Amino acid sequence: MTDQANPPAVKKLFIKTYGCQMNVYDSQRMAEAMGAEGYVLTEDQADADMVLLNTCHIREKAAEKLYSDLGRLKPLKAEKPDLKIGVAGCVAQAEGEEIVRRMPLVDLVVGPQTYHRLPAMVRGEAPAIVTDFPEEDKFDHLPARRATRRAPAAFLTVQEGCDKFCAFCVVPYTRGAEVSRPVDRILREARDLVDRGVREITLLGQNVNGWHGLGSEGEWGFGRLIRALAEIEGLDRIRYTTSHPNDMADDLIAAHRDIPQLMPYLHLPLQSGSDRILKAMNRKHTAAQYLRLIDRIREARPDIMLTSDFIVGFPGETDQDHQDTLRVVAEVNFGTAFSFKYSPRPGTPAYERPEVDGPVADERLQELQALLTKQQKAAQEGMVGRTLGVLFEKPGRKAGQMIGKSDYLHSVFVDAPQAQVGDLVQVRIVESAANSLHGELVA
Ligand code: 5AD
Ligand code: SF4
């Protein structure tokens, strides 16, 4: 029988990604690693030979989603006993064997530091549960990023893990200690992405601005890395996330002033505007220090848009503390921000502390979100009449329409029948809709 008559069966992989952008990047890399094993991605879970759930552990709700999704997979597994089900990411790291005990339909459990071993696990050449923190660098063991043309915007992980130990946060336990990838690897990966059509790179790390590494003239900080990346011909836009206020070094602030490719957008979590709560959270800065930092960043790049993360109802938070948060938010005026109700995470220092009453925390969350939504709307409306760069990422639903991201990361819809995905164009913003902008090409 010829190969043509009996082609090798293509195996299909369905990946669901929960949580942060680090996970989006990890899912892409796992898809590439499994691609070398003959798996192609499918968007249809029912059609898959393997389902991989790449999980997030940051809040309880995020972890619970995994178990309800696994429950929903039971009928599919009953129908297709050969279906492989894998759990990756931070819940895998934190709960390990417990996942298989609770959900025996799970075949594989792989932590975020060991996903390069996934192909061997699927082949049965490695244990079914791998959640150690290995000495080896997973990036050395992953296949080169696929030699196909890529979407115009890509993620690139430069740093992983966190040494900050905020009292509420599981990341230092699930992602481990801070590790920075070496300069030459990052530059090589960035050049490679640009060669494949990428024009915008978002540098990723749990504490990305804490990145440091040995470069040509000795130790480099994150600002120096951005300067080196900006020299890559064809790399038009650089972004980074997520940063800690205490790692906003002078050189990084100066990079926002000097480097046009560095987009005028900064996500800088504050968590609370109360010094008492910031101290209890182990954030190691005050509200006034944060405000001073914002002043310096705005001096360097006056048009920068700031975004943030907040937690309400942290143990011990009083109404006065909450008012302090509202006051600081009003003073900074954020472009957008995420706000969460505190979720006690086992193993973190704040876990045992007495909680704020649920309804009180709910009310505070609503109040904060109302203020942040107002600021987000005003920031978006402030774009109307301005001319901004927009990088087209995909065609819109309407004929001739393109959807792209502005310098400030807003989605922008533009009628541009001649344009192609990957075009970076100047657009005059004409309208602000609920979660997007509409604009016209500037001739
Ligand atoms: N409860 C609520 N929010 C949390 N975050 C991290 N840990 C918790 C927790 N235990 C939020 C922080 C962080 C964002 C990624 O998630 O605001 O910046
Ligand atoms: Fe978690 Fe704090 Fe580290 Fe951010 S800086 S990952 S909130 S411990």
Image (tube, rainbow, N blue to C red):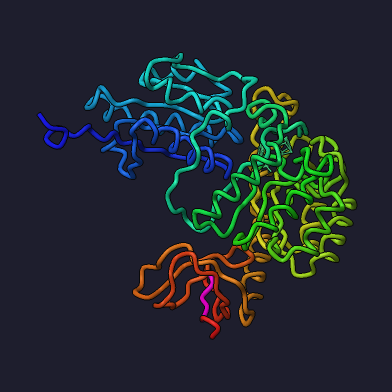
For the point 56% across and 60% down, which residue is it?
A: 199
* 48 relative to 274, above or below: above
Quadrant observed for ligand 1 in the rendered image: top right
For the point 34% across and 74% down, which residue is it?
A: 399
Q: Looking at this view, is 322 or 430 the one in front?
A: 430
* 199 relative to 436, above or below: above
Q: Quadrant of residue 60?
A: top right
Q: Is residue 288 magenta?
A: no
For the point 64% across and 45% down, which residue is it?
A: 204
Q: Looking at this view, is 257 or 105 the one in front?
A: 257
Most common secondary structure along the magenta stretch: strand
Residue 168: in sight, yes or no? Answer: no
The residue segment tinted magenta is: 436-440
What quarter of the picture does the C terminus occupy? bottom right
Q: Residue furthest bottom?
A: 443
Q: On the rendered structure, is 175 left or right of 68?
A: right
What quarter of the picture does the N terminus occupy? top left
* 312 relative to 152, above or below: above
Q: On the rendered structure, is 337 left or right of 140?
A: right
Q: Position of residue 18 (x, y in %)?
A: 50, 40
Residue 253: in sight, yes or no? Answer: yes
Q: Position of residue 7 (x, y in %)?
A: 18, 34
Q: Position of residue 238 (x, y in %)?
A: 65, 57
Q: Quadrant of residue 398?
A: bottom left
* 211 relative to 119, above or below: below
